[in-house]
Image (tube, rainbow, N blue to C red):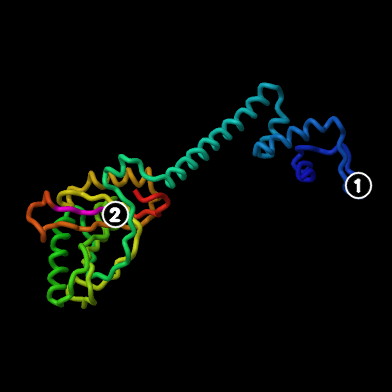
Amino acid sequence: MLRHYHHLGLLVPADVDPGSGYRRYTAEQLPAAQVIRRFRALDMPLEEIQAVLAAPDLQVRNERIAAHLSRLEDELGRTQRAVASLRDLLAPPAPGVRAAGIELRRAPAAPAAAITEVVDAQDSAPWLQGALGELHATLAAQNVPADGPAGGIFADDVFTRHHGQATIFVPCGGPVRPMGRVSALVVPAVELAVITHAGPPADADRAYASLAAYVTRHALAVDGPMREYYLVGQRDTPDDSQWRTEIGWPVFQTGAVG
């Protein structure tokens, strides 16, 4: 350490033994050594310590020390915010959030019949209904029973660029043979923050916004496509006010299930 300080010109020894390289310091250098040690304990870079020691007057010296203290305070603030955020992830959701119907859930992997295409967001609603009709017709033709509500998997581009890959699937209780646009798919398992939207899927923007706010505050979001599950839809009732869609945001669960 002393060799490094010597090399930087930060603390130059009063004498260096030419044979052994042993460095000798005078008592007058002790204050400078103590100042260096104290500033290093406060994570001040060596070049900044050198600038403090080389300050031409007390005002400049104090300004340089104050600048480092300001940086420490900024770093401390960032650390405190990070700690608060991590603690919040471990805490159960607030009662108001639970009342909003948002919950954390793990969706298991499921074999399904699926249709995958790149779609425009403005065409997604009619495309979705057409895909659902084709999937159910294909399963009926092959005498394969559905094994749960139909769902959708939507790439981020569908929402950010209004054009992207979408998959509509129907879980099934047996193997399905590819036919037309329909193919076999194993829907991957995922952990989700889930909210239920009442009404047609095309009007789910407010539900998506509420879910995004929840995930930002209470969960650790991960990269991955959004999920939808169509609990009640056009096949069940023509009254779209009765339709129910579960919207799922991929998360990494860290706290209590709310």
- Give, as a three-letter code, the residue at label 1: Pro
Quick one: 64 or 206, which is closer to the camera?
206
Image point (35%, 41%), residue name:
94
Q: Secondary structure at mark 2?
A: strand
Residue 245 within the magenta-colored segment of the rendering: yes
Quick one: 93 or 33, which is closer to the camera?
93
The answer to whether residue 242 is above or below residue 181 is: above
- Give, as a three-letter code, the residue at label 2: Gly
The answer to whether residue 180 is above or below residue 99 is: below
Mark 1 or 2, nearer chain start: 1
Task: Quote the CA–CA distance across marks 1 and 2.
Answer: 73 Å
Among the 4 quarters of the image, the one containing residue 226: bottom left
Image point (24%, 70%), residue name:
112
Disc number for residue 117: none
Image point (79%, 30%), residue name:
31
Among the 4 quarters of the image, the one containing residue 111: bottom left
Q: Residues within 10 Å of mark 2 (few under 14, many from 20)?
A: many
The answer to whether residue 105 is above or below residue 88 is: below
Q: Position of residue 183 (x, y in %)?
A: 23, 73
Residue that mark 1 sits on? 18
Q: Residues within 10 Å of mark 1 (few under 14, many from 20)?
A: few
Q: Position of residue 123 (x, y in %)?
A: 16, 56
Q: How many marks?
A: 2
Q: Secondary structure at mark 1?
A: loop
- Would residue 100 appear left or right of 136 to someone viewing this image? right
Residue that mark 2 sits on? 248
- Would residue 144 appear left or right of 36 to someone viewing this image? left
Residue 38 within the magenta-colored segment of the rendering: no
Image point (30%, 70%), residue name:
186
Q: Position of residue 133 (x, y in %)?
A: 13, 65
Per the rendered image, the range of residues in magenta is 243-249
Q: Quadrant of the N terminus?
A: top right
